[in-house]
Structure formats: C-alpha cells, structure tokens
Image (cartoon, rainbow, N blue to C red):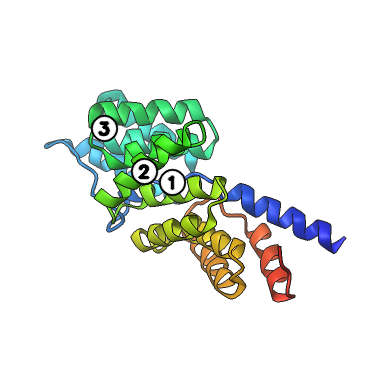
Amino acid sequence: MKRRLLLATLAAIQLLCMAPALPTEAVPGAAPPIRIKAGSTRAAAEAARALDAYLAGDLPLAGATYQAILGHEPRHRSALLGMATIAQRQQRWAVAENYYLLAIEADPQDVWAQAGLLNLKAMAEPQAAESRLKSLAQSQPGVFLPHFALGNLYAALGRWNEAQRAYQRAVGADPDNPDALFNLAVGLDHLRQPDLAAGYYRQALAAAERRPSAVSAAAINLRLAALASGGAR
C-alpha cells in the first residue's frame, strides 16, 4: 500500500512538472515591462485589472478583460500573452498557440511569445526547440520563460541535470514563481538530493498561496511526507 501511494505521488509530481508557466512578464522586475502605445490609458487600466484578476485566480474575469482590450487594440501585447497563458492553464493548446502567433506577428522579437510557443511545440521537435530556447535564454538571461520552457523540455527527455540547471535559472529570474520552485524541487528529487528538494517543495507551497499556479499542495505534502520518512524513488 505504501509503495502504491508513493508511486501515485511521484506520478502526480512528474505530471505537474510540465505545467504551463505564468505570465510574470507583467509583474514588476520579472521581465521587460509591458509596452503600451502612447495615449492608451484605457488599455493600460484594463490590463492592470486583468492582471489583478489573473493573480487572484479569477481566470474568467481575466480572460473577459483581456478580450475587451483586444476588441479595441488587437495587437496589445499584454492581452495577447495573457490570453495565451490562460488557454495553457485550461489546456487549450491550439488556442494558446494562436495567441502566441499573434503576439509574434505583432512583434517578431518578443522573447516571451517565442518561448511560450516553443514550450508548446517542444515535444514535437525537441532538437529544434532546444536550440532555439537555449539561444533565447542566453540572449535574455533575466527573462523567466525561456529557462522554464527549456527545463520542461529537458525534464520530458529525462535529462535531469540539465533540467535542474534550467529551473535554477528560472527561479533566479522569478524567485517567487511557484511553478518554477516546484519544478526545481522535482529536478533535485530526481537527482536524489532530498534535503534540497524538500526545501524547494516548501517554498513552492508558500509561493502558491500568493500566486496562481499548477502546483498541487496535496501532491507536494505527500512527497514531503515520503521524503521525511526516508522515501526514495
């Protein structure tokens, strides 16, 4: 029974490891600021309300507000990225891809949109995605999403040493991101560093109380209990 419980816990953790990233480019200090056209005070106010709703976990209100922005500013970066991320949270992959493509069409140099799209496509063409994500991560070391997406790719391929390093950089770019903290813990767990993993699992739990995420408190608490009792993979 104990063995089955541990395997179920690990399966949940490994599944959550591929959770979509959050749009922390809209949070001060996390990445380049939102670019708003001069005079677009209405869009700026609506974007702020949408972000507040998103951070409060109200995805329907956030989505409706972003849609309202796009109704009068179809190329608004924050709204396009917000809609893409909400679609990812809802596992509507084709919808998310379309919004990322629209963001890239509006600004072909948008690192966040490029990395988000690559994160969606990584499993179909892992070598091409790895090369492009590494380039984005090197050119924009302070932007969260390229590092996070690269870590997800490495994790899916079982390259846990590289995944752990990528997730460490993602945490460096956005220290309070619960998904990044959680994925770093998973990487350390796979590398048989239980004490470090437990510390990051706890940080992920604390961060998830402040920001919306794909983190499962129940799964983490089960894994923490297993680690505390000497549980191993």
Q: Which mark is residue 149?
A: 1
Is disc 2 in contact with disc 1, using a CB cutoff of under 8 Å?
A: yes
Q: Amino acid at mark 2?
A: Leu
Q: Judging from the image, what secondary structure is the residue with disc 2 in?
A: helix
Which of pointers 1 and 3 indicates the residue nearer the eye? 1
Q: Amino acid at mark 3?
A: His
Is disc 1 in contact with disc 3, using a CB cutoff of under 8 Å?
A: no
Which quarter of the image is occupied by the N terminus?
Answer: bottom right
**Vertical position of residue 48 compared to residue 230: above or below:** above
Q: Judging from the image, what secondary structure is the residue with disc 3 in?
A: loop
Q: Quadrant of residue 217?
A: bottom right
Q: Residue at x 50, y 49 (%)?
A: 154
Q: Which residue is mark 2?
A: 133
Nearer-the-camera pick, 89 or 112? 112
Residue 168 located left or right of residue 132: right
Nearer-the-camera pick, 190 or 175? 190
Q: Judging from the image, what secondary structure is the residue with disc 1 in?
A: helix
Q: Amino acid at mark 1?
A: Ala
Which of pointers 3 and 2 indicates the residue nearer the eye? 2
Which quarter of the image is occupied by the C terminus?
Answer: bottom right
Question: Is residue 208 in sight in this rendering?
Answer: no
- Sequence-wise, the earlier of marks 3 and 2 is 3
Q: Residue 202 in the image: x percent, y percent?
A: 56, 69
Residue 90 located left or right of residue 42: right
- Sequence-wise, the earlier of marks 2 and 1 is 2
Q: Residue 189 in the image: x percent, y percent?
A: 60, 64
Q: Residue 226 in the image: x percent, y percent?
A: 72, 69
Q: Residue at x 38, y 29 (%)?
A: 99
Q: CA distance from mark 2 to mark 1?
A: 7 Å
Q: Residue at x 64, y 62 (%)?
A: 220
